[in-house]
Amino acid sequence: MDAEELVQLNNEKRKQLSQENKKYYEDMLIYIRTSYNTSDQEMEEILVELLDHLIEAQAEGKTAKDVFGKQPKKYANEILGELPKGVTKKHIQYFVMLVCYFLAAASITSGIFNWLGPYIFSVDSWSNTYYLGTFVLKALLDIPFAFLIMFLALQYIRWTCFKEINNKRFLFLSGLFGILAVGLFVLVALIIPDLGPKVELPFYIIILFGFALYLIGRKVSKAI
């Protein structure tokens, strides 16, 4: 079975677990899956093996703690240490997909603001002036920032695994993280001056460009 089929099998088999065992296992599953430098195929195979082992133990009256121990994060790290590391073709495809989606979202959002400008911001034109040097420099900064934010978000998710975290605290920290992330992109947009040749584009060209990038990202995602 490929990785996608293993994920579906895992989803079905988890229904056999008790609430306590399910919570323990799903924390381990999230912790392992958010490890970004391992093969999806081998990762999912290990997760199904662990699940089968737990289901058998549960039938004998054992809990997940009896099977995997009281230090699940340490156990999960040992499992990850045994999986092969490295950048795979799938990781490169994920990178291309995320870059396309990120640029598509930025383009569509920019186009929509230009379209609504005359109605909301008293702007006289549905076009906007873009400086090519500024655009390239922003992309060179925003894309690494986006991946940094994604990396930090994954680390935060991994940190929450195997912990009892108050919902209000979780929402507060998530909201704070979101505000800081948006603020970072706004700061980049404000501090970069106008550079290079300029071109004036109507809003619909920007939106169409965004949708084209989205379709490319979607095509890449289907190939993963």
Image (cartoon, grey):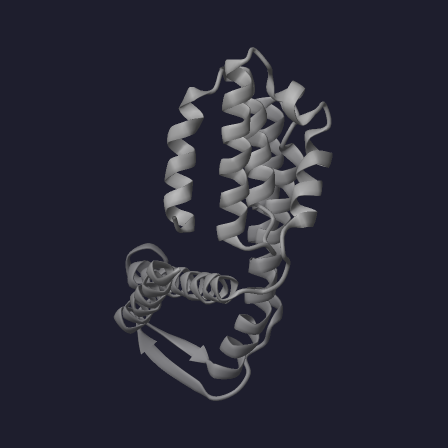
In the rendered image, residue 89, in percent from the top left (x then y), is placed at: 49, 67
Q: Residue at x 47, y 65 (%)?
A: 99
Q: Residue at x 41, y 28 (%)?
A: 13
In the rendered image, residue 185, in percent from the top left (x then y), is placed at: 56, 59
Classify the position of the C terminus by image quarter: bottom left
Q: Is residue 1 left or right of residue 131?
A: left
Q: Is residue 164 left or right of residue 219?
A: right
Residue 33 image-quadrant placement: top right
* Foreground of the two, 73 or 173: 73
Q: Is residue 59 above or below residue 103?
A: above
Q: Residue at x 55, y 33 (%)?
A: 50
Residue 177 image-quadrant placement: top right
Q: Is residue 22 among what the camera can see?
A: no
Residue placed furthest toward the bottom: 197
Residue 164 image-quadrant placement: top right
Q: Is residue 119 among what the camera can see?
A: yes
In the rendered image, residue 9, in percent from the top left (x then y), is placed at: 38, 36
In the rendered image, residue 188, in percent from the top left (x then y), is placed at: 60, 65
Q: Residue at x 38, y 66 (%)?
A: 107
